[in-house]
Amino acid sequence: MKMYILINEFVPPGIAVVAAAHASLACYLKFKDSPEVAEWLSGPFFKAVCVVNDGEFEQAKACPDHVVITESSLGGKEVALAFKPRQEWPKGFKFFRLYR
């Protein structure tokens, strides 16, 4: 089981770290009663934090069960997406670059 957190590449590193933390918590709170989250919490609860461009960010929104994080200091722009943990992911997710 893995939770994906996607950070838009325009986000400065300091804000990206906070956005990733907010995204993880928001996703957990939204889906905490789902069987997938219960299973994820019972084992090693993996997360993949990736950096994506605008196109990848928009395309990823087509994947269900996610939360969108905005940043007030950036004019309310969408900065992160977090997806409910699951076993199987759309093929494109494995090509996202890890945030470093």
Image: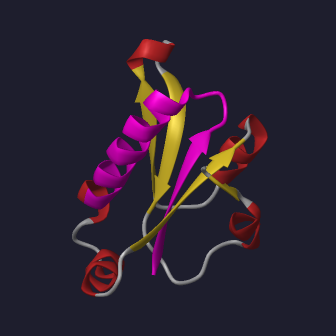
State the extent of the magenta-drawn residues as a range: 1-28
Q: What is the x, y in percent for residue 78?
A: 53, 30
Q: Nearer the viewer, residue 44 or 53?
A: 44
**Residue placed at 76% from the left, 64% from the top?**
95
The quadrant of the rendering that contains the N terminus is bottom left
Q: Is residue 89 above or below residue 7?
A: below
Is residue 81 shown left or right of residue 67?
right
Question: What color scheme is it?
Answer: secondary structure
Residue 18 position in % (x across, y down): 37, 36
Q: Tell me which residue sits at (29%, 74%) in the image.
A: 34
Q: Is residue 41 left or right of residue 12?
A: left
Looking at the image, is 59 positioned above or below residue 33? Answer: above
Question: Residue at the location (47% across, 53% down)?
Answer: 82
Say which quarter of the image contains residue 24: bottom left
Place of residue 58 in the rendered image (x, y in percent of width and height, measured from the top left): 69, 42
Say which quarter of the image contains residue 85: bottom left
Q: Is residue 45 above or below residue 54?
A: below
Q: Out of 78 and 33, give the one closest to the viewer.
A: 78
| Residue 11 on the magenta span | yes
In the visual, does 14 lie left or right of 35?
right
Q: Residue at x 72, y 49 (%)?
A: 59
Residue 37 in magenta stretch: no
